[in-house]
Image: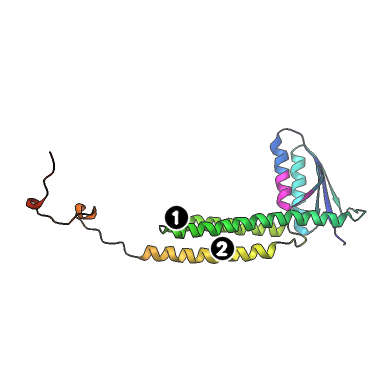
Amino acid sequence: MQIDWILLIYSLPSHPSRKRAYVWRELKKLGAIYLRDGVALLPRNTAVDRRLGDVAERIQEYAGTVELVLSPAFLNRQPERFVDRFNADRTDEYRELHHECVHFLRDVLEDVDAATFGFPDVDKLDNDLHRLQRWLGQVRERDYFDAPGLDRVEDMLAKCERAFEQFASRASEREKRPLPVQSEDVFERLGGPANVPNAQDPELPL
């Protein structure tokens, strides 16, 4: 398997820890794997080269040291093992995302069963659905080797989208229904007879 890699080798001061955390988060967004502390590996493409260049500049701004090694050669079938690690990470993410999609469908069902849903519930679910869609897009961007699990998540997310459309449609229909006319007689609204003459009112105990 012929893969063109890029290797980031860096070090940062121990404090403040937020600088190390920033670099770690940026590399995690890219889906990098660590060969050891401060040594991260990614397959090369235009977007990866650009974003790793940005990370390298930030490391220098943080008073760290950094080297970008282009197209390193690995021996002893290392590339295949690297690909397995990338795919394992993405498969875990697809599994987690599938679980969140199932949770989303359960939320829709619970709101429907509550029979009191309306536009506030629609707004919340709409935000949740967009979060799932963005999440899938981010994982796909760092899925460099077509890890197992994408098709399963895409099918489940499509179900989430259809369920949300139906839910929003039902909420819209509920909003269009006229409110029931309420009697102006408070006693009647509390369950008693309306317009009872005073003379026939039951005497209240003293």
Task: Determine the CA span between mark 2 and mark 1.
Answer: 18 Å
User: Camera-side residue: 152 or 14?
Assistant: 152
Dot 1 lies on which element? helix
Task: Give the image location of residue 174, x and y in percent.
Answer: 39, 63
Position of residue 11 relative to residue 174, above or below, is: above
Determine which residue is flagged by label 1: 120
User: Is residue 163 shown left or right of residue 115?
Assistant: right
Kindly give the residue lying farthest to the right in the view shown: 75
Upstream in the sequence, badge 2 or badge 1? Answer: 1
Instruction: Judge whether residue 93 can be spotted in this image.
Output: yes
Dot 2 lies on which element? helix
User: Camera-side residue: 166 or 40?
Assistant: 166
Determine which residue is flagged by label 2: 160
Position of residue 120 relative to residue 166, above or below, is: above
Splitting the image into 4 quarters, where does residue 192 fall?
Answer: bottom left
Magenta includes 27?
A: yes
Q: Name the residue: 56% across, 64% down.
A: 161
Q: Name the residue: 80% across, 42% down.
A: 38
How many C-alpha atoms fall within 10 Å of the one at disc 1: few (<14), some, or many (≥20)?
few
Task: Give the image location of residue 168, x and y in percent.
Answer: 47, 63
**Segment colored magenta:** 24-33
Magenta includes 54?
A: no
At label 2, which amino acid type do we have? Cys
At label 1, which amino acid type do we have? Pro
User: Camera-side residue: 199 or 132?
Assistant: 199
